[in-house]
């Protein structure tokens, strides 16, 4: 038997917050848009005419606890 010690080839480096911040903001805006379409896209606040979006996200509304009928 030999005494072999394995060393990692590279150490992980942390990603600076200033590089992550635009992606965090973008993800937050996408999540707000998704919550709007699932939770409020009908009636007076509707951006898309008709019931197309409502029917598309109907099961998601119930899964997240939004009342719709």
Image (tube, rainbow, N blue to C red):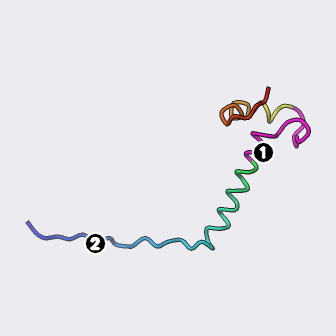
Residue drawn at x 73%, y 45% as measured from the top left: 35
- Tell me: 52 left or right of 60: right
In terms of image quadrants, where is residue 40? top right
Name the residue that disc number 2 marks: 7
**Quadrant of image for the N terminus:** bottom left
- Tell me: 68 left or right of 46: left
Q: Nearer the viewer, residue 54 or 1?
A: 54
- Tell me: 20 left or right of 61: left
Q: Nearer the viewer, mark 1 or mark 2?
A: 1
Q: Which element carries disc 1, helix, strand or loop?
A: helix
Which circle marks residue 45 in the picture?
none
Residue drawn at x 91%, y 39% as measured from the top left: 44
Sequence-first disc among 1 and 2: 2
Q: Nearer the viewer, residue 30 or 44?
A: 44
Q: Which element carries disc 2, helix, strand or loop?
A: loop
Name the residue that disc number 1 marks: 36
Residue 33 horizontal/vertical position (percent): 76, 49
Q: Residues within 10 Å of mark 1 (few under 14, many from 20)?
A: some
Residue 59 horizontal/vertical position (percent): 69, 30
Residue 45 horizontal/vertical position (percent): 89, 42
Residue 41 colored in magenta in the image: yes
Magenta range: 34-50
Residue 67 horizontal/vertical position (percent): 76, 31
Q: Which residue is outermost to the left? A: 1
Q: Is residue 33 above or below residue 12?
A: above
Residue 54 colored in magenta in the image: no
State how far apart marks 1 and 2 are (Cα): 49 Å
């Amino acid at each position: 038997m030999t005494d072999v010690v394995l060393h990692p080839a590279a150490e992980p480096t942390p990603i600076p917050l200033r590089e992550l911040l635009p992606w965090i903001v973008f993800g937050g805006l996408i999540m707000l848009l998704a919550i709007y379409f699932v939770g409020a896209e009908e009636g007076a606040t509707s951006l898309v005419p008709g019931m197309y979006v409502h029917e598309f996200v109907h099961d998601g509304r119930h899964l997240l606890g939004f009342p719709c009928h």
